[in-house]
Image (cartoon, grey):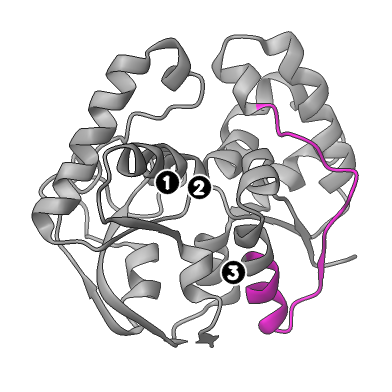
Amino acid sequence: MTQIGLFIPCYVDQLYPRVGLATWRILRGLGLDVEYPKSQTCCGQPMANSGCGDAARPLAERFLDVFGKYKHVVTPSGSCASMVRNHYDQWLAGKPGFDHLKSNTFELCEYLVDIVGVTRADGDFPGRVGIHMSCHGLRELRMARSSERMDAPFDKVRGLLAQLRGIELVTLSRPDECCGFGGTFAVAEQAVSCMMGRDRIADHERAGAQVIAGFDMSCLMHLEGLIRREGKPLKVAHVAEMLEGARLS
């Protein structure tokens, strides 16, 4: 069984292919057996978020058909990983191979930390960086402690990035607030979505960030659009791009 099936979300494939390539290089750099199945399609999240379950079902079924043969599925997207693990049951529960797929689909950072056991990132990324913790990754994948919980603090993304030489991770006043993207929410509720995005950007600006880092390019795409339209000097970067040149062990 090939160890890893690499799932690249639609918007990454079409708009940010460098993030997909960075993810591939990170996994291959660790000596892992990785395959990119060319027959993959959308996971169905946009349809499901819009209430179009009948349109999402065949995409979920295809995802199982394409990726069910792999030991692990890895994606540079917390929201897509959460879609498989937390929202596919309504269409795939009881189907052969689904339990395995559900338990073995991972966002890149959690895969590096929880499955591969990466404890060191030997690389460089000079500058002041704020981390945007996307909602799906934070509250559905549990990639960090959310502010409403009182258990011991942890943050899998920060733990990786903090080791890069020259990086200064700034402290946000509202570290786990939504950026307002929400997939089709940004279309249906454009004004609210943009207001939330501007609030998120302002928090990073107050903290002195030069770069907004994240593990969901969809959220970063939303923030980048607002930043670009308002002529702000902030940059955005996916965690995979930041870790690509580092030696992970």
Q: In which quarter of the image is the C terminus?
A: bottom right
- Closer to the camera: disc 2 or disc 3? 2
Q: Report x, y in % for residue 55.
A: 75, 13
User: Residues under labels 2 and 3: Cα distance?
Assistant: 22 Å
Mark identifier at residue 217: 2
Residue at 16% across, 43% down:
202
Q: Is residue 31 magenta?
A: yes
Please state the extent of the stretch shown in magenta in the rendering: 23-44
Q: Is residue 150 visible?
A: no
For the residues bearing labels 1 and 2, Cβ distance under 8 angstroms? yes
Residue 140 versus residue 56: which sits nearer the camera? 56
Quarter location, residue 92: top right
The residue that mark 3 highlights is: 115
User: Which residue type carries mark 3?
Assistant: Ile
The residue that mark 1 highlights is: 220
Vertical relation: 180 (above or below) 167: above
Q: Mark 3: few, some, or many residues within 10 Å (few <14, many ≥20)?
A: few
User: Which residue type carries mark 1?
Assistant: Leu
Quarter location, residue 27: bottom right
Which label's residue is closer to the chain start, 2 or 3?
Answer: 3
SS under mark 2: helix
Q: Is residue 124 visible?
A: yes
Q: Report x, y in % for residue 244.
A: 56, 76
Residue at 80% across, 67% down:
3
Which label's residue is closer to the chain start, 1 or 3?
Answer: 3
* 100 sits to left or right of 228: right
Q: Mark 1: few, some, or many residues within 10 Å (few <14, many ≥20)?
A: many
User: Which residue type carries mark 2?
Assistant: Met
Q: Is residue 153 magenta?
A: no
Tally of marks: 3
Q: Mark 2: few, some, or many residues within 10 Å (few <14, many ≥20)?
A: many
